[in-house]
Image (spheres, rainbow, N blue to C red):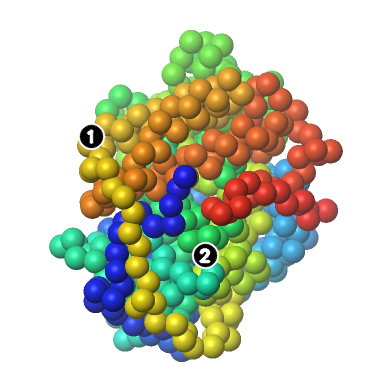
Amino acid sequence: MIPQYLVDFDLSKLPVVDTDVIVIGSGIAGLFTAIKASEHARVIMVTKKALLESNTRYAQGGIAAVISKDDSPVYHRQDTLMAGAGLCSSAAVDILVNEGPDGVKELIKLGTTFDLDNGKLALTKEGAHSHRRILHANGDATGYEIVRALSEQVATHPNIEVWDNHYVIDLITEDNECLGALLQRPDGQRVFLRGNATILCSGGAGQLYRYTTNPEVATGDGVAIAYRAGAVVRDTEFVQFHPTSLCYPGAPRFLISEAVRGEGAVLRNIKGERFMNKYHELLELAPRDIVARAIVSEMELTGANHVYLDITHEEPETVKHRFPTIYQTCIGYGLDMTTDWIPVAPAAHYMMGGVRVGHHGETSVERLFACGEVSSTGVHGANRLASNSLSEAVVFGRRIVKRIRELKPLEKTGTGISYQAARTGTPSEIIERRLELQKVMVRRVGLRRNAEGLKKGLEELERQLPIFGQELTTWEHFEYANMLNCILLLTKSALTREESRGGHYREDFPKRNDENWRKHILWQREKGMLEEVSDDV
């Protein structure tokens, strides 16, 4: 019921722009991959907002890599597999933990300044990590520092052209080969951007939910356009809810980094009682899904809409130095984290699933690659280990570029491709309908799920399917269609997986079931739902 293309077009009547490599997205995955690709190719980077607007910019905690002599790739591997709950790709995890340190070194060469401790890289610890291996920058502004450094490289690079404020409507394919993308410019004009290779680095989909730590641009565009182009999408049911986002009247759902708990903060319910001892032996440093559900349980038991994060026992100057961004943000809302308990609640944060890729970022569509949160490399499994995502983007970005250099020149022109469909008007009330989608996700497909709620949610969602037969003209229309596309895949997968594992929790199937469900749920537009056995060992 979801078509290959969102809009009608005739490529023979559209302007064509040629380049070697197309990079869609401007987070760490897009920026780093563009820089690496530009060493031997011409790159056009497309971003639907500004160069600096991405999920990476808001990443506080840091980037995970084995740097300390006390640590080893073996420990990092064990921690990642444990968090992934039996659905990681062992081979992909091996690649990450062994190549991650070199990726960090390359970020430093490109101008990223990580925090130091007595002249050495400062390392901290986050939930489910057995060793201190999280590098950070400016205390709690790691993502911003990485994006700053990489953006400066991109902005002045002679082989990279940046197209700000351009929307990728769909990928153009012929015989399962990606020829490029159909774009809409800021003035409404459409253009066919053709390239030898196309790399999706479009980030996540936190905006599928009403409450999220993600910026407004994170609407799942990459997953949706890849799905429509015929690529295999995997593990969409696994959504990580960050346990501790600021929950305070008048404030956005600002992320309170897991690193705060890594440095000693504790969780308390509204009665002031610590409670994580009831839920997991690792207490506040348990995997994120466990902490998030524990918080929801305490909220229900106490009739509250939040719990508290308490780091008031630490020295005030230490807190201010280590978490300057969080401290200043909280102060702006009248909260002093050195003396006040900070009200927090879970919010949608990260999608473990995405476009299925191989060990060099290749999708099931030729010449189409994916990197970063939009991809499913197999590293994260059912639950991402904190701070692995920035490492993943760098490691697999490097591998994608190596594979792209092996590609033969594109022979197809695509100029004979056109698409026409019967249209039934233009969508109305998109803002209201988008909000309704988000509310359905919170009510029916959130932290805790069950068959009754998922079925009701699916019924509500499927009533919106006619939008794919309407005339879509604005960015708001495209975003809404992409969100609906992703939400349908996510909800159907969540209804199908009758167990609880990682970021997917079913109240009616509360236990993990390795006998029947140690496998992945896949989606491909023309084939529907497929299954794939996990290679985690």
Let me know if residue 181 appears in the view.
yes
Q: Position of residue 14 (x, y in %)?
A: 25, 73
Three-letter amino acid code at disc 2? Ala
Q: Position of residue 407 (x, y in %)?
A: 55, 85
Q: Does residue 66 sit above or below 250 in this rendering?
A: below
Q: Residues within 10 Å of mark 2 (few under 14, many from 20)?
A: many
The foreground one among 469 and 70 is 469
Q: Which mark is residue 290?
A: none
The foreground one among 432 and 536 is 432
Q: Is residue 474 left or right of residue 114?
A: left
The foreground one among 402 and 179 is 179
* Residue that carries the numbered disc 1 in the rendered image: 429
Q: Residues within 10 Å of mark 1 (few under 14, many from 20)?
A: few
Three-letter amino acid code at disc 1? Glu
Q: Does residue 248 sit above or below 150 in this rendering?
A: above
Measuring 58% from the left and 81% from the top, which residue is drawn there? 402
Cα–Cα span, label 2 and label 1? 32 Å
> Tag 1 or tag 2, which sits nearer the N-term?
2
Measuring 69% from the left and 63% from the top, which residue is drawn there? 92
Measuring 66% from the left and 69% from the top, which residue is drawn there? 359
The foreground one among 2 and 390 is 2
Measuring 46% from the left and 64% from the top, which residue is drawn there? 200
Q: Position of residue 479 (x, y in %)?
A: 33, 48
Q: Does residue 484 sit above or below 402 in this rendering?
A: above
Q: Position of residue 188 (x, y in %)?
A: 18, 61
* Residue that carries the numbered disc 2 in the rendered image: 370
State the SS at label 2: strand
